[in-house]
Image (cartoon, rainbow, N blue to C red):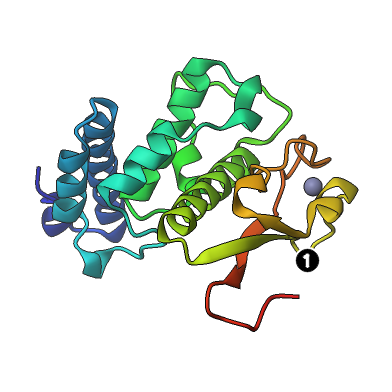
Amino acid sequence: MQPTCERNSASGSATLLCMHKFTTEAAQSIRRAIETGELHRAIELHCRFFPPARVTHIHDTDENDLREFLHTPLPIFSFCTDEELRELRLRLDTAICLGARPESALMPDAGFSWDHPMSLKAAAQNFFNAIGAHRNISGWLKSGLVETARILNSSDGPCSACLQAAHEYELHQLPNLPLHNCENLNTIGCRCVICPSRIKGLTQQWK
Ligand SMILES: [Zn+2]
């Protein structure tokens, strides 16, 4: 598959349309590769269709990242059916591969229904946040350099449960994000983040 439409198009809108089709086809190829577990192929396709110069990356993708996105347990999404969660993961994995923003993975598409109190956009953001935190904590545990971490609240009106959870923890005692008792799970979701607070050999700490 090559992006030939762009070269042959006379008008700007036709170019846009063809680029959209190309992007969709590329996304579908990447998606199929992710779906069948061919993560190497997904990454190879991503590099072929979206060379770095053409993509604004918000995620550095590698095979480990994709595995993380496919397999990290997400207890907060227990309200989803297995099928919904799988579909959400696939859409977001595809977005990651394309270097796209999470919202772009949630464009209306036949066959996907989402009938839950948490908005689909909030679900995507919480999903990314949860997996990012999971990946960071795994890395900190492996390195042995981070001794404690702190939950930090967002600056836009955190709920009382999030405020209460915002303190320092030993790594193995950190609660999962999104916080299960966050009062915003029915709307915008939990926006808390986790940052290292005590690092071996460093005396200065987050307060
Ligand atoms: Zn909250």
Residue 24 relative to residue 115: left or right = left
Looking at this view, name the residue that lies furthest to the front.
Answer: 201
The residue indicated by pointer 1 is 155
**Residue at 13% of width from left, 53% of height from top?**
48
The local secondary structure at tag 1 comes to loop
Please state the horizontal and vertical placement of residue 190, each as a whole percent of the image. Answer: 72, 47
Q: For this rendering, which residue is in front, 184 or 17?
A: 184
Residue 161 x, y percent position in the rendering:
85, 46
Q: Quadrant of the C terminus?
A: bottom right
Residue 59 point in image, percent of width and height: 39, 58
> Where is 11 relative to 134, above or below?
below
Residue at point 17% right, 55% down? 47
Say which amino acid is labelled 1: Ser
Q: Is residue 49 left or right of residue 160?
A: left
On screen, 77 above or below 54?
above
207 to 112, vertically: above or below: below
Judge the density around disc 1: few (<14), some (14-19), many (≥20) Cα neighbours within 10 Å. Answer: few
Q: Residue furthest right?
A: 160
Does residue 109 appear anywhere in the picture?
A: no
**Horizontal side of residue 7 vs 174, given as left or right:** left
* Image spot of residue 2 (x, y percent): 9, 48
Q: How many marks?
A: 1
Figure quadrant of residue 86 = top left
Camera sees residue 186: yes
